[in-house]
Image (spheres, rainbow, N blue to C red):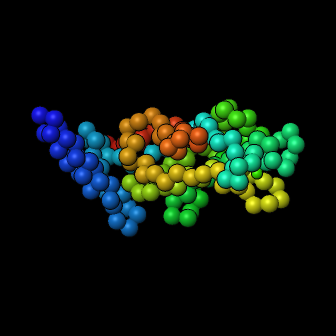
Amino acid sequence: MVLFIAILTLSSCKNKKEVSSGDNGKPPKRLLSGKILESVTIEKVMINHTPMFGPDGERWDSWAIGQETPDLFVVLKFRDQVLYESETREDVAYGVAAELEKNLPVSLNSWNLEHVLYVYDEDGVSADDNVGFFSFIPLEFEKKDEIVLSSSDAQLKVTLRVKWNYVNK
Ligand SMILES: [Ca+2]
Ligand SMILES: [Ca+2]
C-alpha cells in the first residue's frame, strides 16, 4: 500500500512537470474547474529575514558606524527583464521583517516559467551587495495565498502575497 502511494505521488509530480513546461514563453492553457489561469498578481512583498553577516563574515555595512544593518530592496526578473523593483527599506534590524508595497501590484503572465527574485543591500557609492536570490516557477505555488521563498538555513526568507487570476472558459 505504501509503495502504491509512492508511485502515485511520483507519477502526479511527473504530470505536473509536463504541464508546466511551455515553449517560447507562452503559457499553455490551464484548466481549473472550468476556468483558465490567466495571470498571478503579486500584491505584497515581505522580506521576513536576512542573514546578519555578509559573505565576508562582516555586518552588511560594517563601515557605517551605527548603520551596519542592510538597506534592503528586491528585484524580480524574468529572462533578464526587470518585472518589479521595490523601494529600499533602510537599516532593517536583524530579525525584523520589512514589508514592501511600492510598484505593486505586479502581474506575471509567464507563470509557468522560471523567475528570479534578488535581494540586495543598497550601498550608495560601491556596488550593492547581493544578499541572495531565489529561482522559482510561480505555477508550483498555484492556489496558495503566498509564495514563500526560503534558504535552506532559513536565514534569508521572502514571502510574496499573491492572487491567482482565472477567466471563465
Ligand atoms: Ca553593504
Ligand atoms: Ca545600512
User: Residue 140, image x and y in percent?
Assistant: 38, 46
Query: Is 57 located above or below residue 33 in the figure?
Result: below
Left or right: 114 as drawn, with respect to 69: left
Report whether residue 120 is seen. no
Q: Between residues 25 and 150, which one lies in front from this camera angle?
A: 150
Residue 6 position by quadrant: top left
Query: Is 23 located above or below residue 158 in the figure?
Result: below
Q: Residue at x 65, y 42 (%)?
A: 51
User: Residue 104, image x and y in percent?
Assistant: 60, 43
Report whether residue 4 is seen. yes
Where does the N terminus fall, quadrant-wise?
top left
Q: Between residues 143 and 68, which one lies in front from this camera angle?
A: 68
What count of labels does the image hold?
0
- Residue furthest to the bottom: 24
Residue 143 position by quadrant: top left
User: Residue 149, image x and y in percent?
Assistant: 50, 43
User: Residue 101, image x and y in percent?
Assistant: 64, 39
Q: Residue at x 69, y 41 (%)?
A: 52
Where does the C terminus fall, quadrant-wise?
top left
Left or right: 37 as drawn, with respect to 149: left
Left or right: 151 as drawn, with respect to 166: right
- Residue furthest to the top: 96
Q: Between residues 39 and 3, which one lies in front from this camera angle?
A: 3
- Residue furthest to the right: 65
Left or right: 19 as drawn, with respect to 76: left
Q: Residue at x 36, y 57 (%)?
A: 27
Q: Residue at x 38, y 62 (%)?
A: 26
